[in-house]
Image (cartoon, grey):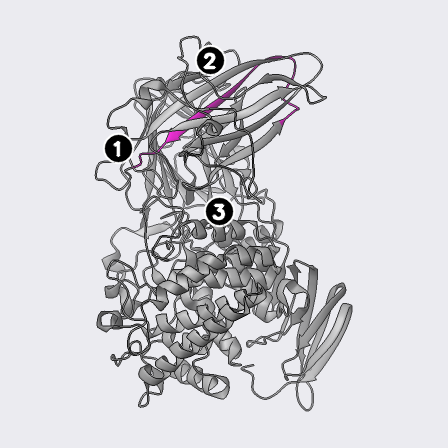
Amino acid sequence: MDEIREWRAGWIWPETLRREQGGGMRQQRALFRRAFEVPEGGARLKLDVSADSKYRLYLNGRLLLRGPAKGDAWAQYYDTLEVREALVAGPHVLSAEVVHYPRLAALPGAQAGPASEWRADCGGLWVQGALEDERGAVLETIDTDGRRWRALPLEAVSIRPETLTLFVGGTEEARGAEIPAGWQDAGFDDASWPHPGVTEPLDRLYGQTSPWQLTARTIPPLRETPRTFARVMRSEGMPAAGGASPIEGTSGEGEALAGAMPGEDAATAGGLSDIGIGSGICSGSRSELPFPLMLAPGQAVSVELDAGLMTTGYVRLACAGGAGAAVALLYSEAYEYEHPAEHGGQRRSVRDDPEGKVLHGNEDMFLPGGGGTAAKPEVYEPMGRRAFRFVRLSAQAGEAPLTIVNLDYAEAGYPLEAVSRVTTSDPLSAALWDISLNTLRRCMQDTYEDTPYYEQMQYVMDAKSQALFTYAVSADDRLARKTIHDFHSSLTPSGMIQSRYPSVNGQFIPGFALYWIMMVHDHYRHFGDGQLARRYLSTADAIVGWFDRRIDADGLVGAMPEAHWSFVDWVEEWNATAGSPAAKWQGPLTVYNLMYAAALRQAADLNAWSGRGDTAAEYRQRAERVLAAVRRLCFDDAEMLYRDGPQVAQFSQHTQIWAVLADAVQDGDARALMERMLTRTDLPKASFSMAHYLFRAAAKTGLYGYADAFWQPWREQVGLHLTAWVEDPVQQRSDCHGWGALPLYEYVAETLGVQPEEPGYRTVRIAPRIGGLQWASGEALTPVGLVKVAWRIEQGDGADRFVLKGEAPDGVPVVLVLPDGSRHRTAGSIFTYECDLKEDATA
């Protein structure tokens, strides 16, 4: 049910910025303060907070919260918090820094902020709350207004041109001398700060649409965990032995430091360390890192630091003195060859090997104001979240000495509680699991993200897979529910949803809209939430209607609009066509028709589950008509494969995979098609984005034994010391991409075999896939509780035996499907089953 609230507070912004001409091309920043007095006897501060575009909120200089969660024109999310312990009797101040990114982000010369951060034409801070006594009586309202709040435009930080990345926005240049020292403290004198301008509270607009449609945050706050860097990889210009720096003037090649990095997931840390990925997850004592690092006037130093794994967070630089100095922070995923042509065009090899390589990346620049001391240093922290494995600190002192007191970071991400865990006879399975879990964590923020380094965008195809991975390890659907709603909110009058959203830069990939329907279907299967399914039926109707209007005289969905991107997968053969089969130039794409038929079938399920039987029947009839046209026009009798287009003698794994998943071919014919596909070496192969569907087709046709070979691209990355999975094995643009975390789902849903037999796990299905393994064990968290499975293959004189032991929550019905095809029913508790194994090991 939509929330109904009385909004008293106004949106405030400095008047000079509100009236600025041409402000749509540059970012604006402002500082805000609201002083208040806490009486004797105790009190609590209850607040709702939001801002356009991003804020940091402080109480007496201590960071309380960052926000808001990413929304759009129809959902301006606000955060809610309550403060008690910090409120002692005496003066206090609530302060905030807010940045508003330019609306015209795509224009040349604009100071581009993150494209995924929605913004209105004007910036603003909104706070509604009160100081209350212990009984809940209001002592003082803290609502944003033009009388008791103070605001100061901040010109000290500018956005630099964006390079290397696409939609993250430019990095920052911050001039410390122009930032009022101590502005967050209660004793700071803000009498010279003007009062801000105020936009009317939303309840006075008589139904007119506000730029900020206030909506309560639907996901938990991001978790921030203090981290120190793991090791020094390389340094230049360091002080000589006996100088002030603890590290001597060497350029040592990254000797690992002892000790485990603190964190909430010790299992992940141990796994990565055990397989020898770089330094593992480790951190040295403060004395082993080069801080405090003291520079004499005119001295320059460079230090390259390893976080120990690919991560996301907020880097914090603390400086003392240093007027006239410059400090640059470069963020990088890996060491790269400076001249890739000399290495077969390869940019990267072993990620933490600096020999003959350099760090490339974006830089934040901080110019110290010179007023910091060791006891109270100047602290610079970029407003935006950064992704990195390595950080290079480059400092050039001016005429005054400079001390880098410290450089550390707060790891940030969605508070994923990963409970499920799987181990197998594959010696690399622990590495595949741990790297996948780190990949998923880094790509879960206030939306799912494709690449935290290069884009920080939420795409439908990526998010559909990431949601399944999340269900597998945590049974947490909160971020997935927000994602489903995000894309529902992007629906256009044509019936098409945007392929990435929230975003101020629109984009359409028609196939991604079909994945959204499948994502809603996935959610119902795992959680059985009929209310959510019914909520989004109209959007599913609009999407299938968009495709239905493009059915041509032959019964196929025709060519996609020229302005839309017919992306399918990143494969080498399709680089020239940007991830699309070349057949798109000559008419319909077979794979899009098959995906459309599969989506129609799943939309039919959603309608049947929601009580719309007639619509369900209609959608199934539509799907069968499309499949009949595909069988008639797209199957090649000579090659015994489906063509990429009806008139084009080109073939790919992708088209065959979707022929199986859409039921264009079934049973033994489907298995034969997959076997023909897998024996061909000349077909464009499914890359990481499509790998989930390759595994599904193999499982559906009883060919999961090929999974052992499917995992080879993941295994190769372990040897390259990756701590998150690459975007694709062809371009390898990014070293962290969400869809690569596939092992999390496969190990739970197929290797252990734990899936919903009925929506919402009303009945649990356990149907293990052997996939070339000798044993597997683990536990899977489901919405109905923890399910434990352990199986092994026992060698016998005759046939080998498959032995399974399991445990499910008491009273929960369980259906077991063993590798010999036998089915068994039980109800919770502990159980053991076994069977003879067939000679066919591909089951």
**Precedes in sequence: disc 3 or disc 2:** 2
x and y, in percent, of residue 184 in the image = 48, 19
Q: In which quarter of the image is residue 402?
A: top left
x and y, in percent, of residue 578 in the image = 27, 62
Tell me which segment is drawn in magenta.
83-103
On screen, residue 696 above or below 297: below
- Circle 2 Cα neighbour tier, 10 Å, few/some/many (<14 / 14–19 / ≥20): few
Residue carrying label 2: 147
Residue type, label 1: Met
Residue carrying label 1: 25
Circle 2 SS class: loop
Residue carrying label 3: 308
Circle 1 SS class: helix
On screen, residue 824 above or below 254: below
Tell me whether circle 1 and circle 3 mark residues in contact (CB < 8 Å): no
On screen, residue 625 above or below 544: below
Q: Please name the residue shown 41% across and 27% down the image.
A: 124
x and y, in percent, of residue 11 in the image = 44, 25
Tell me whether circle 1 and circle 2 mark residues in contact (CB < 8 Å): no
Circle 3 SS class: strand
Q: Is residue 796 left or right of residue 673?
A: right
